[in-house]
Amino acid sequence: MGFAFAQVSPVAYIKMHSPLIYTTKRKKLCVSAAKLNADNDPLLLAATASASLRYQETLRPEPLFIDPYAGCLIPPNIPKDVIQDLHPYCLATKFIDDKLLRTVNRFDGVKQLVLLTDGMDTRPYRLNWPASTIIFEISPERVFKTAAEKLKDVGVKIPKRCIFYHIPLESSDVEQSLQFKGYNGNRPSIWALQGFPVMTLPIFEEVLSMISSLAMKGSLFVGELPAWLVETDIEIKSYTKQWMDKLFLSKGFRVEMINYEGVAESFGKYFATEHYNNILFVAEQLRHSDDQMESWRREFQRIEDEGDEESFEEL
């Protein structure tokens, strides 16, 4: 099949052709078994489509960002013509890049970043992360392995004094895998979602629940949500803000929808919204993480135990 990804929305591949992704009670995000290859794997095709858009943005006369590694991730038969119009995916990418860097640089000590991606996200390599940044990426394992091999061939490495862990989307327990790798819910974190294969509204609700249980109060969640998830629950777009507020607040987040036109204007760019109606958002965690609650429970228990000992001594 052809690879005219420049004109194809990465979300379209996920929505129309992806194998079933579902959850279990243990918050396992599973991908149904299927015989797939580079020509028919919808997750790989979607990730490659996004990499192609980043590559072409890099080649523009005044690019929003430069992705020096996107070129090695795309097949040689993909058209290399530069697209003149600003693609909204690239606008969202720049916004998320800047939000991640500004937030992480405000953290003291260890800095925790969790990326929910398509497996070909180059943010761990191309952004200037401060020292002591721990980057966790949750993505489809087969796509990540394909990308990792290509990046290794061109000598791409994680910035010095930073740590990177990949958590396979297919893990039996994503939460547990993150914690096993060192994620700490008693420390601030920032989470980002772009390209992650969210197939249904219940899946996204599971993702929100997972982040809510892991993220320390005040942590941020930034990303791009496929608009068709909203359309599965409501029919009138004017209700989108109310729908977003209700959905995120039910999981403990205060959310703000970000206007693409406003973002483009802030960069001195013109942006046409036609044929692209995804939702760019920033959300703040209002609840305490499970780790915070457990720490406070232990402290409360310690104080109670000490009080009991003092009362016993007085007797």
Image (spheres, rainbow, N blue to C red):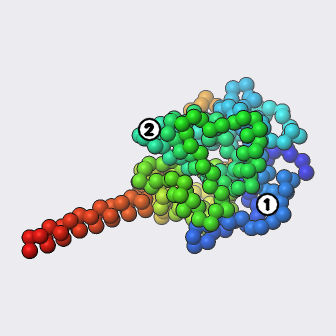
Q: Position of residue 147 (x, y in %)?
A: 74, 46
**Mark 1 belongs to which amino acid?**
His
Tell me what residue is drawn at x 64 percent, y 35 percent. 126
Dot 2, how many residues are within 10 Å of its Cα: few (below 14), some (14-19), or many (20+)? few
Can you identify the residue that label 1 sits on? 17
Q: Position of residue 287 (x, y in %)?
A: 41, 59
Q: Can residue 83 be seen in the rendering of this structure? A: yes
Q: Nearer the viewer, residue 225 or 59?
A: 59
Tell me what residue is drawn at x 84 percent, y 63 percent. 35
Mark positioned earlier in the residue sequence (1 or 2): 1
Question: Which secondary structure lies at badge 1?
Answer: helix
Q: Can residue 273 be seen in the rendering of this structure? A: no
Q: Quadrant of residue 43?
A: bottom right
Q: Quadrant of residue 124?
A: top right
Q: Nearer the viewer, mark 1 or mark 2?
A: 2
Question: Which secondary structure lies at badge 2?
Answer: helix
Tell me what residue is drawn at x 54 percent, y 62 percent. 176
**Mark 2 belongs to which amino acid?**
Arg
User: In 3D space, how far apart are the residues under numbered discs 1 and 2 (Cα atoms)?
Assistant: 40 Å
Can you identify the residue that label 2 sits on? 106
Q: Position of residue 200 (x, y in %)?
A: 66, 64
